[in-house]
Image (cartoon, rainbow, N blue to C red):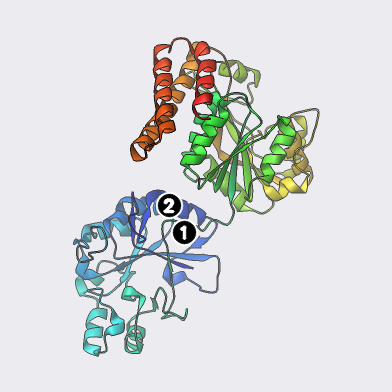
């Protein structure tokens, strides 16, 4: 598989641009493939990938190259020499973008790039039949050829097109050549995949289930920790076990704001943990799943690192992690864990717990019999979940019982180098202040959306809701020192507003 990129930047105004976030995710999704230079490419090896860039815009150096360096991926740079240090103002359809300078091309080489040839002027060679013009475009100036002693063996047809005369001349001068739609996958007609912003190379889908039962106070922070991941899940299900607090209001607002990724389920009656969790699993459509308690949060690379563990081998059914305690009762929970698991304490607010890694399956099974080290938010393979019949009633914790049965059924568990953060609850003033701050920002955003709705359409109900919500926000500010009094009043007011 040969990939073709043009521009990588902070935004993607047209199909020829890929955002930094999307590019990072695409590189992550290639981590189980063999990324090679064209010199080492075997078209019959389905696991090999070549990453190529056409035109060589400066965003490749600013944004793509550091990411490629992180993953240690080689890449090919197809150079149009007439564009060096200029911009693309000749392309009236595309937003302006700057091409790299000679110095920047040297820096790209240091990141692992290899320079190849893309003609002098990017002319469409399919329309050219004059051998003199063809060869003039194919000839690499000496000063350019000296820029990379290992490069310029490969050619990319401008606009991906060529004719028979061009094909003949290219075969005389280059080791191979790339098209993007006209080729037949022979060495001088290798086709490339044009990568766009929503291209995905992910083999497996990931679902995050955020389970809530009267944890509306903390739901905002939990959801935002998932939305802030370096690798987003394919779906987020907020599953509400018939809460009597504002879980529904907050969840529906998130569902409306992120309809492409967030779904909301509300049970008509309280099912309890076992039935609720099994039902939630039945509502997602992914290969890998993890639960996140609505009162907890995850480190920004949690999904990325856990995904990589499960993706590393089909025999691995569980990716577990370390975790840390936070909240006013965190220190007490930390001290109860015992010295063997206790790790660093950060600012006397975050208390880290580290778990062991196991090379031997028998040691892992024995250790799990002695006590649990796989927490309930560990990511697991859905097939391993189905293999053991899902969550079941047990004397101990339901997640411990589930993962223990997976291990006993010969599924492997491997540790991912990331972190879950467990909230340790209290009713202190400081704990509730953080909750109120999050809610204030959340409802302020809701107020602004309702106000826009009133300005866009003459909707008296939306306008009345706006006024009521504004009064609620004012009430929050005025009574900021009395969180216990606020919680119930906010919920009752907002429940009436959003009906």
Image coordinates for residue 119, horizontal then vertical, percent: 26, 75
Residue 292 falls in image quadrant: top right
Q: Where is residue 239 shown, x and y percent of the image?
A: 62, 36
Viewer-nearest residue: 136 or 428 = 428
How many numbered discs, if any?
A: 2
In terms of image quadrants, where is residue 388? Answer: top right
Task: Identify whether 112 is placed above or below 263.
Answer: below
Q: Which one is in front, 370 or 19?
A: 19
Task: Check disc 1 and report its element: helix, strand or loop.
Answer: loop
Is 393 on the left or on the right of 430, as rendered? right
Cα distance in 3D space between marks 1 and 2: 8 Å
Whether residue 179 sits left or right of residue 326 in the image: it is left
Q: Residue at x 49, y 40 (%)?
A: 256
Is residue 303 positioned above or below 330 on the image?
below
Q: Are the two marked residues, 1 and 2, in contact with CB atoms closer than 8 angstroms?
A: yes
The disc placed on residue 284 is none
Q: Secondary structure at mark 2?
A: helix
Q: Nearer the viewer, residue 27 or 287?
A: 287
At 41% from the left and 81% from the top, the residue drawn is: 188
Q: Which residue is mark 2?
A: 22
The residue under the point 65% across, 18% down is 336
Please name the residue shown 38% across and 37% down the image.
453
Sooner in the amino-acid sequence: mark 1 or mark 2: 2
In this view, the residue in front, 443 or 236, is: 443
Give the image location of residue 376, x and y in percent.
66, 34
Q: Does 149 sit left or right of 235 as displayed? A: left
Q: Where does residue 337 sit, x and y in percent of width and height?
A: 65, 22
In the picture of the structure, the residue carrying the numbered disc 1 is 199
């Amino acid at each position: 598989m040969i990939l073709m990129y043009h521009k990588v930047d902070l935004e993607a105004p047209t199909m020829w641009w890929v955002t930094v976030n999307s590019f990072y995710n695409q590189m992550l999704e290639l981590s189980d493939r063999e990324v090679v230079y064209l010199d080492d490419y075997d078209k019959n090896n389905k696991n090999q990938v070549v990453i190529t860039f056409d035109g060589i815009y400066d965003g490749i150096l600013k944004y793509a190259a550091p990411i490629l360096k992180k993953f240690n991926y080689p890449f090919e740079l197809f150079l149009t020499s007439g564009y060096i240090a200029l911009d693309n103002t000749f392309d009236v359809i595309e937003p302006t973008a700057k091409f790299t300078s000679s110095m920047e091309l040297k820096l790209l080489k240091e990141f692992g790039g290899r320079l190849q040839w893309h003609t002098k002027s990017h002319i469409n060679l399919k329309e050219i039949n004059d051998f003199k013009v063809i060869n003039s475009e194919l000839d690499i100036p000496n000063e350019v050829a000296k820029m990379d002693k290992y490069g310029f063996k490969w050619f990319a047809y401008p606009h991906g097109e060529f004719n028979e005369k061009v094909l003949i001349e290219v075969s005389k001068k280059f080791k191979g050549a790339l098209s993007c739609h006209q080729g037949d996958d022979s060495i001088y007609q290798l086709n490339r995949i044009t990568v766009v912003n929503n291209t995905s190379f992910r083999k497996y889908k990931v679902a995050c289930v955020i389970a809530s039962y009267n944890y509306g106070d903390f739901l905002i922070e939990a959801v935002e920790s998932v939305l802030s991941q370096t690798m987003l899940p394919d779906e987020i299900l907020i599953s509400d076990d018939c809460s009597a607090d504002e879980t529904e209001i907050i969840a529906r607002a998130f569902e409306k704001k992120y309809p492409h990724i967030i779904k909301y389920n509300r049970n008509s009656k309280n099912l309890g943990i076992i039935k609720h969790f099994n039902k939630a699993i039945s509502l997602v459509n992914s290969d890998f799943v993890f639960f996140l308690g609505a009162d907890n949060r995850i480190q920004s690379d949690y999904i990325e690192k856990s995904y990589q563990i499960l993706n590393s081998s089909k025999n691995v059914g569980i990716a577990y992690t370390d975790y840390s305690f936070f909240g006013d009762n965190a220190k007490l929970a930390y001290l109860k864990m015992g010295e063997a698991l206790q790790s660093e304490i950060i600012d006397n607010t975050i208390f880290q717990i580290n778990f062991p890694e196991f090379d031997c399956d028998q040691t892992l099974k024995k250790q799990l019999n002695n006590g649990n080290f796989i927490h309930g938010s560990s990511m697991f393979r859905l097939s391993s979940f189905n293999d053991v019949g899902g969550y079941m009633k047990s004397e101990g914790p339901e997640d411990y019982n589930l993962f223990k049965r997976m291990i006993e059924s010969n599924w492997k568990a491997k540790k991912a180098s990331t972190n879950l953060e467990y909230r340790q609850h209290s009713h202190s003033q400081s704990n509730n202040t953080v909750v109120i701050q999050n809610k204030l920002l959340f409802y302020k955003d809701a107020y602004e959306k309702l106000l826009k709705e009133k300005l866009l359409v003459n909707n008296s109900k939306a306008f009345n809701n706006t006024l009521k919500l504004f009064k609620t926000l004012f009430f929050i500010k005025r009574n900021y020192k009395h969180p216990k009094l606020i919680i119930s009043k906010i919920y009752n007011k907002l429940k009436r507003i959003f009906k």
